Image (cartoon, rainbow, N blue to C red):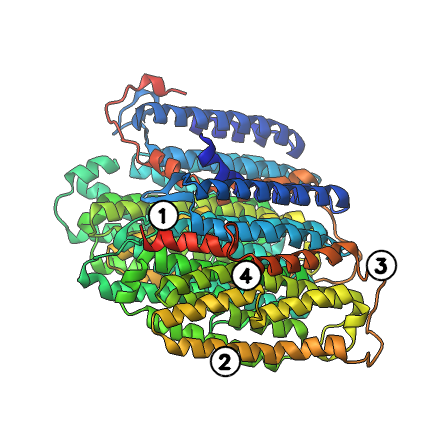
Amino acid sequence: MTATALLPLLALLTSLLAAVVIFVLPESSHRVRILVNLMAALLKLVIVALMTWGVFHGVDFSVSFTMLPGVSFMLRADALAMLFAGLSAVLWLFTTIYAIGYLEDSPNRSRFFGFFSLCVASTMGIALAGNMFTFFLFYEMLTLSTYPLVVHRGTEKALRAGRNYISYTLGGGVVLLLGIAWLHGLAGDLAFRETGHFQGADPALHGQLTLIFILLIAGLGVKAGMFPVHGWLPQAMVAPAPVSALLHAVAVVKAGAFGIVRVVYDVYGIDFAFMLGLLQPLAWLAAFTILYGSVRAMAQIDLKRRLAFSTISQVSYIILGVALFGPIGTVGGLVHLLHQGIMKITLFFCAGNYAETLGVHRVDELDGAGARMPATSTAFTLAALGMIGVPPLAGFVTKWMLGTGALATGVEWAVVVLLLSSLLNAAYFLPIVYRLWFCPVAAPWPGERRWGRLETSAWLFWPPLITTLMLVLVGLLAATAFSPLSWAQLIVVRMYLP
Amino acid sequence: MAGLLFTPLAWASLSLLLDFRKGRCVSWLGMVIQVLVSLALWYAVMERGGFSYALGGWEAPLGIALRVDGLAVTFVLLTAAVATACGLHAGFYLDACKPWQRYFWPLFWFLWAGLNGVWLGADLFNLYVSLELISLAAVGLVALGGEAAALRAALRYLFAALLGSLAYLLGVALLYGRFGTLSLALIDEQLASCEPALIVALLLMLAGLALKTALFPLHGWLPPAHGIARSPVSALLSGLVVKASFYIAARLWLELGDRLGSPWLAQSIGALGAAAVVWGSWLAFRQPHLKQVVAYSSVAQIGYLFLLFPLTFAVAEPVSLLAQQGITLQVISHALAKAAMFLAAGNLILSIRSKRVDALAGVSHFLPFSLFSFGLAGVSLMGLPPSGGFAAKWLLLQASLASGQWWWVGVLLLGGVLAAAYVFRIYRASFLEVGDSDDFYHPPQSLEAIPMILALLALGLGLVAEPVLSVLSLPFEVTADVNEAQL
């Protein structure tokens, strides 16, 4: 087996093996577990970096074997895959560090980190999947491996949220499976291809293809948190903060959004999807979800629930970008996949820090937290400003690309949606920032803990600061050759100019 | 090949003379032999394809004819794997002090002999004999507990099994009266037109076998019997025994169904299967006892098997092949997953000292390993990737779509959702955190490892489905040399 076939497998196996080792380790061997976790995360980062470099230079990383008659298991690294794989590899490292600190001295850590690694392995698989079948394989594996994380606390409330989560996601999975099986029956095993497969398809099939498209998007939309199937997301907030961070920024919602990108571009082909008239309704739905999520977010008092509704809104930016049918909009959507991940993970890290250090869960308890935890609050503020789209932070870059993309294709109403959404983002983020810095401490913190010199445990302290640095840098250096933006442009060039 | 039948019979007689512990040692040795012989047969089939073998050199009308092809050898291997796992588990699990436990081993070996007889049998009467052997041994195993409830369930099982056998035998008699032979291959050759008497014969045989396979609405005997039996026994019964009668039904259908069946018959059998999927899953969801959940899940999973009938009737050859492959995978993956699930459930029941689902609270905290095996087996039952259950579901979906029978698509998808409902109910119960004290019994590692291995096999089956299916389609050579087959 050559190195080009080995690397995608290795990227998958690092976290898969880590999961197995962690499951086998006894609950009490914390140090070994931490070591395994961090080594696997670092190793994966190296592998993904290597592959990204290779893909940039046009190396074809792929491996496949026949799994069932007519269906193959296929891993393949193209530029789009590396965007998602890179995101999850980088953020996994920081989330692992954060989770180690967050769960210090809590029970069931072996189970937690085992499923955590499985979850990342699934995400890697989703990123590298070379056809719809393989994608589905890992998509369902992700559902299963996140369930124990959502119900980790084992409380009645967590279990209820878990049931809700699993009903939504497995329901979505069934719809997706129907779509994939139908498509397979119609057209055979379809490897993802930058130009899609149905260019010039028989017009007699258009009706069926439209129906399949709806099924696929509906199935994927559940995880992407699109209206009206977003109900699981705010409830899943009972999970520990690193899990929320992972669900929101990297794994679950992104898997849904990433799947939609794959279906639109690499299965149907953007031109064909546009010709079927499917992109317009998708754009409307995405726009509605953007506004709906923001409006709902304003009404939430619980900090994590507010962030959850914000996620619902923000992920639909990606879908809007895809549905705009133009290279610039697509760049905006794709780069938002990454930017939103970095910003959202920072916000969740900060929310977790407030909860762990001060015992604060509600927005109205945050008064004056800026003085007590200046570093965390700075990170939160910058990430929130980025979400609103203040230049030169990450969020601005995407909103700018989306806006110019919309104008370039003559979809003026999308610009209105973007502006309106920015206003709404400001309306629910700025009050928090205001409370953090400008309100005096009203009451003693509900459950304060102290850790020596730093404002919180070192495991919890550094990850949000690093991700904040990243979100500033990806905004500032967006025009350089190694920014996510340039990578997204590379993807789009390969998609639109085959 | 003959060894596959005689070793179990010899070991059955031998272990009848010994007590439980000695029987255990002897039986474990027997399992090693049996597994090796099964592997040797598999190797032989891989090398040269399927062949027939007349026992003791006596040809068909007088002697016992055996035949082996890719499908049969796959099931022989499957039986070896599952039975070995259950036998090992039983050796640790059953309480050696109870006097009646010594009968476990003879019954176990009779069961194994019967199963191999079904997989390898070439004529209808041998199949009947093997089936009876299986039924009687299975009834004995159910009654092994000795409690009143177990005896009641066993008796109920016995009546159902006997009624099923009678119906089957009547059908066989009708066929014999018409053709004067019991060899399935010869009947297949002679059968030209469709006569009412033959249709009645087929219907009788199918009805009898459906009763033995516990097809809805004839499933009433299964849950009490499988629920109350000792866990390794339940695993054997659910994993293998019900498959034997289904295997015969499927072979009858595939050989004779194209001429004796009708679309109406095929669709109604499929509809019964669909009803079993829905009704069995629903009842599984409602059961208060852990093993009853698993038992009703068997009723549901067996329902899928009967989709074979509509999906292979009057459809194009490739579609029929897809359906056959899907059903075969479903049989294999269900055997592995269900055996794993019953064994894991047995471990859990040992640990929580209660049979109830709601007593599982805290299990995930203190006994993650047993729960994990249960969960992995559940993945296959739900038909989620990459399990064998998923591969089976995928092939059946393709077959339904390709044959235009889209209504089965709904059944397959709904079945998966319902299975998720009852499996996740167990997870939910066991993820609940109650207190920090660990007052569970921790089973020894060997008990925990066996269901885990089976569950991993079921899970991994999807990934290696292609090589497994390629064994199934090995050609059958009628003129093969007989002598080499005397293993």
Left/right placement of residue B309 relative to residue B34 reads left
Left/right placement of residue B396 relative to residue B106 reads left
Q: Amino acid at mark 2?
A: Leu
- Mark 3 belongs to chain: A
- Asked if the residue under mark 2 is in contact with the one under mark 1, i.e. CB atoms within 8 Å, the reply is no
* Co-location on one chain, circles 1 and 2: no
How far is the residue under mark 3 from the one under mark 1? Answer: 60 Å
Q: Residue at x 57, y 73 (%)?
A: A388
How far is the residue under mark 1 from the one under mark 2? Answer: 55 Å
How far is the residue under mark 4 from the one under mark 1? Answer: 46 Å
Callout 1: SS: helix
How far is the residue under mark 4 from the one under mark 3? Answer: 31 Å
> In which quadrant of the rendered image does the C terminus of chain B lie?
top left
x, y percentage for residue B15? 58, 30
Tell which residue pokes out farthest to the top in this image: B483
Give the residue at mark 2: A420
Callout 3: SS: loop
Callout 4: SS: helix
Q: Amino acid at mark 1?
A: Ile
Disc 4 crowd rating (10 Å Cα; few below 14, some 14-19, many 20+) is many
Residue A258 disc label: none
Give the residue at mark 4: A339
Q: Nearer the viewer, residue A98 or B173?
A: A98
Give the residue at mark 3: A451
- Mark 4 belongs to chain: A
Disc 3 crowd rating (10 Å Cα; few below 14, some 14-19, many 20+) is few
How far is the residue under mark 4 from the one under mark 2? Answer: 20 Å
x, y percentage for residue B399? 29, 52
Give the residue at mark 1: B327
How far is the residue under mark 3 from the one under mark 2? Answer: 42 Å
